[in-house]
Amino acid sequence: MQTLAVIDYGMGNLHSVAKAVEHVASGDTKVVVTADPKTILDADRVIFPGVGAMRDCMGELKRLELDTVVKQCAKEKPLLGICVGMQSMLEASDENGGIDCLGLFKGNVRRFKSGMLGEDGEPLKIPHMGWNEVLQLTPHPLWQDIKDGSRFYFVHSYYAELAGPEHVAAATNYGGPFTSVLARDNVFAVQFHPEKSQHAGLRLLENFVTWNGKV
């Protein structure tokens, strides 16, 4: 039986993610929600979720000594980042006056600018909240049976701005295009919430459960 660990550092709807994975996983997958470094490092696959402020996110990761655990997982096993979990993989965030992050991808986390207008000329609200299209820019095993342009559920005021395009796997438009998915080797990270995204989100989680970490 394989084990899938959902990292518990107090920053996310962890049990919602775990229940969604259990729903799509076969009987040979054990899902554990845990903050124990050894359990996480011993798992076959790892999900790194997150919501809330980046300062709190990074503070709890460091307090629990899980920052080094995430970095180690990124080197050796399938790792899925979700929302703030994805953002924390960049070098730094503008949130809370500037916060150093994990540095797994080159780039920074920026806040959506106030005064943005939609295609209809109407002001766009911050946070970006609700369903939006995800445009696939690179092929990936986690896109299997998910149509390009499928809609996923977002809740965020900040977005990832990468230093270059090589690891941008998908983009979404909100007052202009922004990176909604990062991918490199065995790491896949999404700005949206797959556990809240109905069919497309559950399909992505199902693809992750069987992904061997190779592209």
Image (spheres, helix red, strand yellow):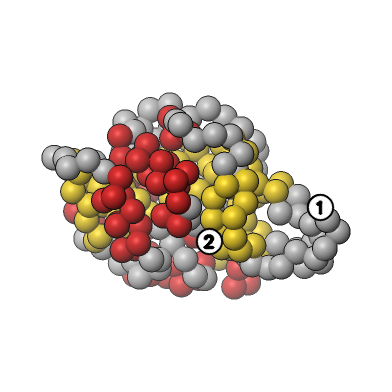
Residue at 31% x, 31% y is 212
Find residue 100 and name its label.
2
Instruction: List x then y, in percent, for residue 119.
Output: 81, 52
Instruction: List x then y, in percent, for residue 159.
Output: 62, 56
Viewer-side residue, 5 vs 56: 5
Q: Secondary structure at mark 1?
A: loop
Q: Earlier in the sequence, mark 2 or mark 1?
A: 2
Q: In the rendered structure, which amino acid carries the disc numbered 1?
A: Glu
Viewer-side residue, 187 vs 16: 16
Q: Is residue 79 above or below residue 99?
A: above
**For residue 139, side relative to residue 72 (left or right):** right
Q: Nearer the viewer, mark 2 or mark 1?
A: 1
Instruction: List x then y, in percent, for residue 96.
Output: 59, 73
Q: Which residue is mark 1?
A: 119
Q: Secondary structure at mark 2?
A: strand
In the rendered image, the residue lying farthest to the front is 199
